[in-house]
Amino acid sequence: MSQDRSWQPVALCSGNHSHLFFPPSTQERKDERERREARAKAVCQVCPVKIECRDYSMSIREPYGIWGGLTEAERRLELSRMAV
């Protein structure tokens, strides 16, 4: 997995959508989190660098946010599956 970040300037999560990809600084209810994550994942689905983003987040073990369409918990699960 690569730690190259040359893909980041074309990622659709930058700019106006960035607030969707990380939890707010205030407490977030479960239904609010689920809606925010669903909206972020919808952006990821059409992003031209989704795979590069996902690979990067996995390679650095990014602990926060949605990267390449995966939440923190989904990345941890994927990493544990890869370790087996």
Image (cartoon, grey):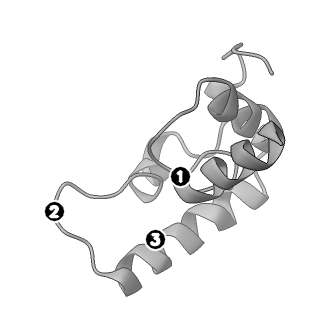
* Above or below, comparing residue 31 to residue 44 in the picture: below
Q: Secondary structure at mark 3?
A: helix
**Local secondary structure at mark 2:** loop
Residue 26 got which mark? 2
Question: Which residue in the rendered view is the most extreme toward the front?
Answer: 84
- Quarter occupied by residue 54: top right
Pointer 3 local density, CA inside 10 Å: few below 14, some 14–19, many at least 20: some
Dot 1 or dot 3: first in sequence order is: 3
Spot the residue most to the bottom. Answer: 31
First in sequence: mark 1 or mark 2? 2
Task: Report, in whole angstroms, how far the alpha carbon at label 2 lies from the one at label 3.
Answer: 14 Å
Secondary structure found at label 1 = helix
The residue identified by callout 3 is: 36
User: Of 29 and 18, which appears nearest the observer?
Assistant: 29
Query: Three-letter amino acid code at disc 3?
Result: Arg
Q: Which residue is mark 1?
A: 72
| Residue for point 53% across, 34% down | 62
Q: CA distance from mark 1 to mark 2?
A: 18 Å
Residue 63 picture location, percent across and down: 47, 40
Residue drawn at x 61%, y 49% as measured from the top left: 76
Circles 1 and 2 in contact, beta carbons < 8 Å: no
Across and down, in percent, residue 48 comes to 81, 42
